[in-house]
Amino acid sequence: FGSQNLQGGITDTKKEHFINDMRTAGLDIVALQETKSKDEVQIGEHIFFCHGTADENRAGVGILLGPEGVKAWKRAGQPKPFRCGEIAGAARIMAIELHFKDNDRKTLKVYVISAHLPTCSFSDDNYQEALDALADTVKRCPKNGVPLVFADMNACIGIRKEYDADTVANSLGPYGIPGRDNNGRGRMVLNWLIEHKLCVPSSFFEKKTYVTHHRSGNH
């Protein structure tokens, strides 16, 4: 599994390059943000599911399935992706159900969600609207399924020691990039995680390096 903000959108050429990069990285399911596309396209053994608006210059999200991801989608009965309505003028949330087989050949239901929350140029009300819609999408996860949220939250959440450790221990680990944003969005995200009993998995494992994209203005 992986997640990538494409920023400039996803052209046909980019799709080919991205599939090659996906193979190299050994990934089979990738959530995409800023796709700027509403097309559903199959390229060889890969399928791009996208969610966009009539104005394809506006954000958009997607989910790219490789061969094993396509098998998991077919095993789930080839369900149509859930596409949330527009939030702050853009398509920002979509999800798809996949079924895998574990080592005991039992079915593992996974609900993959791709999301792109508003930047700081939008109001806190817009941001909260997106969080509420994301919560509603998580609730669509099938019974006994596992929700996996891959999102560009446009917020800096920081690390556990910047908060009351006992309060956030189940949602935020000790590792990552220190420094919360100063517009309160990081705290909004953390409160959302705690409320819905979700966590930031990468913050519980130490890495040699952390790569992030940052724009001025706490985007």
Image (cartoon, rainbow, N blue to C red):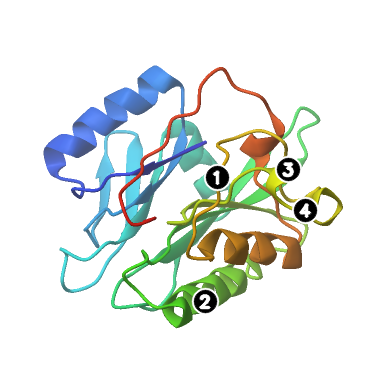
Mark 1 sits on what residue?
179
Q: Secondary structure at mark 3?
A: helix
> Seen from this angle, which residue lies furthest bottom?
125
* Residue 161 tag number: 3
Mark closest to the chain's N terminus, 4 or 2: 2
User: Which of label 3 and label 4 is nearer to you?
Assistant: 3
Q: Is residue 66 visible?
A: yes
Kind of residue at badge 1: Gly
For the residues bearing labels 1 and 4, Cβ distance under 8 angstroms: no
| 126 up-or-down from 163: above or below | below
Give the Cα distance between marks 3 and 4.
9 Å
Mark 2 sits on what residue?
128
> Seen from this angle, which residue lies furthest right?
166
Mark closest to the chain's N terminus, 1 or 4: 4
Give the Cα distance between marks 4 and 2.
20 Å
Mark 4 sits on what residue?
168
Specify the quadrant of the image occupied by residue 143.
bottom right
The picture places residue 207, in percent across and down from the top left corner, at: 60, 22
For the residues bearing labels 3 and 1, Cβ distance under 8 angstroms: no
Give the Cα distance between marks 3 and 1.
10 Å
Q: Secondary structure at mark 1?
A: loop
